[in-house]
Image (cartoon, rainbow, N blue to C red):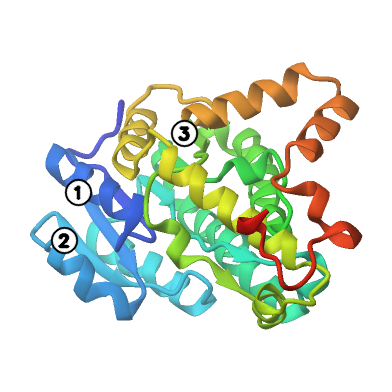
Amino acid sequence: MPHVTREKPVVLLTGASRGLGLELAKLLQRTGRYRLVLTARASSLARLSAECPENEDVWHHALDVASPAERFELVDDVAERWGGVDVLVNNAGIMVRSVAEHIVEADRMHQLEVNYLGPMDLARLVLPGMRKRRRGRIINVSSVGGMMAMPTMTVYSASKWALEGASEALAYEVRPWDIYVTLVQPGFINSSGIDHVEYTSRSRDAAAAPDSPYRAHYDYMSNFIEKLMRLSPATSASVAKKILRVMERRRPPLRVAGTVDARVFGLLRRLLPRQLYHEVLYRCLPGIRHWGPHQLPSHVTPRDS
């Protein structure tokens, strides 16, 4: 990172035990240019240690990003050990799969705590030190779900849109201190991420029930997303390299497309008239003729059609 007074800037990376977070942790360690604070849930620290062992420049710290007490303790511990955070990478996140009708308040808050409230609170906690040093980077890993919403991802899209709006406001607020905020927006990544999708209790039941009015929504969208992930040329490693390049730019932009499809979706959103844009997306939804009142009889599955 340019113009940092310390020999090795301190990078705080959340969600470092798997996927994009783990690839970024390994990449940063290989550079030898940073001190790394790698966080994961306590139950995942053993996996992190096996993949990216601790040394004098790599420190593992347990963190449930949804816990205010653990967030405060983490930032306090980093300040005491290494003098504070120069680069915050808010990577930890979850995806809750559900239509709006199958979400209750607890589900909503669970998604928002991890994807929006936790990351923005970590930013709040590291900012006093960054302002004092008049340097800093805050990189929030967003998603194409933060620029375009998809059915069965109601509360996930809400969390990413909230993160996008708050990050944009924050970018204006802290720029006078040479602190830059960047949203990295990956699209579909060829990874096992689909295996870690969470369902609400109601959406899990509805996805399995033959007579559910939303059965086709869940079935078609799950198959569609899994297929796009398998076909995507983007990997966790390629997105990690993009994040590193953003970190090391003198004046990083506010938004960076993490994958090619994210760039395409962004262009469609900007170039098409809004009404046409939404109509095109609706008509492109997988199996849309079978959704709702037009869905298939319960003894026929979408794969048979």
Q: Which mark is residue 258?
A: 3
- Residue type marked 3: Gly
Q: Point out residue 238 in the picture as x, y percentages from the top left corner.
A: 32, 35
Query: Height in image: 13 above or below 49?
Result: above
Q: Point out residue 64 in the picture as x, y percentages from the top left corner.
A: 44, 74
* 43 with respect to 136 (left or right): left
Q: Which mark is residue 219?
A: none
CA separation in Å, label 3 and label 2: 24 Å
Q: Which mark is residue 51?
A: 2
- For residue 131, say whether it is visible: no
* 199 with respect to 84 (left or right): right
Label whose residue precedes the other's in the sequence (1 or 3) = 1
Query: Height in image: 58 above or below 147?
Result: below
CA separation in Å, label 1 and label 2: 8 Å
Q: Residue at x 27, y 48 (%)?
A: 23
Q: Point out residue 43 in the picture as x, y percentages from the top left corner.
A: 31, 81
